[in-house]
Amino acid sequence: MTVTVSASGLGLRYGSTHALDEVSLRLRRGVTGLLGPNGAGKTTLLRVLATAVPADRGAFTVLGHDPATARGRQELRRALGYLPQTPGFHPDFTPFEFVDYVAILKELTDRAARHQEVRRVLAEADLADVRGKRIRKLSGGMRQRVALAAALVGDPGFLVLDEPTVGLDPEQRMRFREVIARAGEDRTVLLSTHQTEDVAMLCHRVLVMAGGRIRFDGTPAELTARAAGRVWSSAGRDVGAKAGWRTGDGGFRNIGDPPEGASLLAPTLEDGYLLTLDGDLAEVTA
Amino acid sequence: MTWHVAEDDLRAYLRGELAPPLLWSADTHLAACAECRAALAAAGDPRALDAAWERLDAELDAPRPRLFERLLVRLGVADHTARLLAATPVLRRSWLTAVTLVLLMSVLAARAGHSTTLFLAVTPLLPLAGVALSYGPAVDPTYEMAVVSPLHGFRLLMIRTVAVLAAGLALSGLAGLALPGFGLGALGWLLPALALTGTGLALTPRLGPVGAPCAVAGGWVALLLAAAARAGGGHPLAPFTAAGQGVAAGVAALAAGLLFLARDRFDQSRGGAR
């Protein structure tokens, strides 16, 4: 499949902190998940790829557009849909007015064509019934879908979604996943998330970031396979485990290097993710 | 029905060329008037007619623009620009009320027997504050989305600046009419207002959207205090003399030039790490 987004050696420092450190990646059509703990550099990477902030080092192209030049940046932005981590709204606007506003920012100035596009993306985000309600009266899940609808305006070829499912209840999350899955059928979608279930259910590929670097790049199945033979159950806390937590049945689920004769469990994507983080596992040990 | 859509307008409607606010009137009228719908059906070929019905359907489905947007369109502003302006945080009622109150108080102070210096000193700061509060990550909830949009950040900034200046200068001009002994001297705030606003914007890429207007406002206050210390009783402060006005005009022109040169600096976010 054709590479749509290509980055090499991206670096960005804030003071002495390496927010991005030699990040290289190649994305193709479909949904790619971006996992990582807080402060891993996920949002910084998304903001760089969305051209919100420039990188200090390295280069990247999106759908053949190079943001190093003003013209390339503008072309890239025409092909971009961006849902930031904390999307802001004009609370007095309705979803229709807000998406219409974003459509104008995306250079859709013809009123009739613009309104047609607004109706299309509101329907795609399953918001047609609430298009006339004030945004401040909508639930968190609906607001997130309003932001997603705004990102979909203009049928962008590259969709950047920064933790869109945070704070949503399970039903809202499921509806959101349906919309993202539809969006990923014919676009390149980069989805940053803390939810490994999002990745398991939506993504054909996953990147894991920590400390500003990419620590894993492969399929969800390959990430899960990293934990094969390295997950076991025990009656009490196993001090030799890299991470372990009490499960609902009162026993412990451990990951790391199992002791002789341990009762091995089938690994999950989350197990593979936690083992990939390795050095950061202290944070997740309960 | 007391009126019907004119034939020329119906034909323009069919071609998709009828512009707001005439378009809105036609949409609303066509939905209610069978006679005009029949005239529309008779006026064009079937394909154009289908497209027109589709447009009518889309328009009727769209929310009616708010009073502020309708007013802007009636004043000749394009409907998409009116929508951009409606999203300008500072053009809300609260800001316009605050500006009106400040102007009212300084006018009342002048009418109570004090000099017009307070009015002249305060008024240039209002558009500076208005522009500062209309663009940037701290005040615009959609700033991040706007920054990555193809519409150039500088263009959006200029659209909002012109709107804030127009509103601020109009209110200040009206307030000036209420000053005692109204004359050309009462317009002494105008050039300093343009100079301060231009300088604030020109410094924004270096000092940030909060630091730049604060620095400029501080400089203006310091300048006025120094001028007050030098001026004798009854004499106008230096910025409001002919020479001072000339300097303000020069600063405004210089700031406009520097702002234009720095326009690409408004094209990416000033936000830090996340």
Image (cartoon, coloured by chain):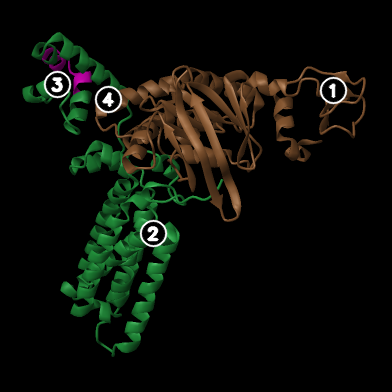
Q: Position of residue A164 (x, y in %)?
A: 55, 31
Which dot marks residue B204?
2
Closer to us: mark 2 or mark 1?
Answer: 1
Q: Which chain is green?
A: B
Q: CA distance from mark 3 to mark 4?
A: 13 Å
Q: Residue at x 81, y 29 (%)?
A: A256
Q: Position of residue B200 (x, y in %)?
A: 35, 63
Closer to us: mark 1 or mark 3?
Answer: 1
**Secondary-structure class at tag 2:** helix
Mark 2 closeness class: few <14, some 14–19, many ≥20 residues within 10 Å: many
Please state which amino acid type lies under the numbered disc 4. Ala
- Tag 2, which chain? B
Residue of label 3? B15
Q: Is residue A203 left or right of residue B49?
A: right
Q: Residue at x 32, y 46 (%)?
A: B156
**Secondary-structure class at tag 3:** helix
Q: CA distance from mark 4 to mark 1?
A: 58 Å
Q: Are marks 3 and 4 in contact (CB under 8 Å)?
A: no
In this picture, which residue range is highlighted in magenta? B29-39
Mark 1 closeness class: few <14, some 14–19, many ≥20 residues within 10 Å: many
Residue of label 4? A113
Which dot marks residue B147?
none
